[in-house]
Amino acid sequence: IPGSDGRYGFGRIIKKDWSDRKKATAIYNYTRGHIAYTGNSNKSSWEKEASNGLRYGRGDCFTYYCVSRALLTRAGIPNIEVTRVQGYGHHWWNMAYVNGGFYHFDTCPRKAGGRFCLVTDAQLKNYSATVGKRSHIWAYSQKPKSPEKVLYQFFKREQEDNDEENEENEEND
């Protein structure tokens, strides 16, 4: 797995004692901030493309999915592949297991904006049906249903500032 040997500064992205939610959020922010969208990638292997994405800092949605998969896996966070089954073109993203369930985790930037860090099925379906123009239609019956509890909002700019507050509230629930 890319990052396992420390070449990519994994210890600078997350800390071992963080909750999985905090680790996933840091991985989301790192991936979004270190890969430029170019519209193409090598789809022969997720491992090769994760390595390319980490090494060269560019790619498409498959690259973002692969880098996220590698980093989430390295952090010990279970995650699965999700692909669009309807709509224009191919699209890949992850679902990451935090807070007792699988949440959508799409680090690929969207023209319409938004943060897709640990969002629910309902949030993603609503986005896809409105702003996203059918951007996220997956095989619903073949993937785990997300919890109903909303962890993050799509268009919240102050997300990083609220992460610690959300973590504290989560512990008190």
Image: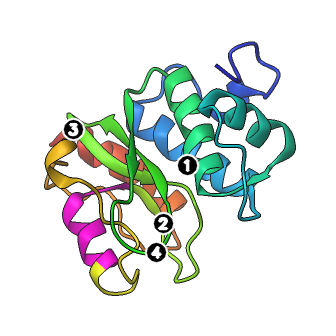
* x and y, in percent, of residue 130 in the image: 31, 87
Give the crowd class for mark 1: few <14, some 14-19, many >=20 residues within 10 Å: many
Q: Tell me: residue 69, above or below residue 10.
A: below
Label 3, on which residue? 101
Name the element at disc 3.
strand
Q: Nearer the viewer, residue 51 or 105?
A: 51
Q: Tell me: residue 125, above or below residue 141.
A: below
Residue, x 65% and y 47% (percent of image)? 63
Q: Which mark is residue 28?
A: 1
Label 4, on which residue? 88
Residue, x 47% and y 28% (percent of image)? 18
* x and y, in percent, of residue 8 in the image: 79, 28
Which of labels 2 and 4 is toward the front?
4
Q: Earlier in the sequence, mark 2 or mark 4?
A: 4
Q: Tell me: residue 170, above or below residue 9.
A: below
Q: Earlier in the sequence, mark 3 or mark 1?
A: 1
Kindly check if marks 2 and 1 are in contact, taking CB atoms under 8 A apart as contact. Answer: yes
Name the element at disc 2.
loop
Label 2, on which residue? 115
Q: Earlier in the sequence, mark 2 or mark 1?
A: 1
Give the crowd class for mark 3: few <14, some 14-19, many >=20 residues within 10 Å: some
Tell me the distance, in whole angstroms, between the alpha carbons under discs 3 and 1: 17 Å
Residue, x 19% and y 41% (percent of image)? 172
Q: Is residue 52 left or right of residue 153?
A: right
Q: Tell me: residue 55, above or below residue 90.
A: above
Quarter the C terminus occupies: top left
Name the element at disc 4.
loop
**Residue stretch in magenta:** 118-128
In magenta stretch: residue 63? no
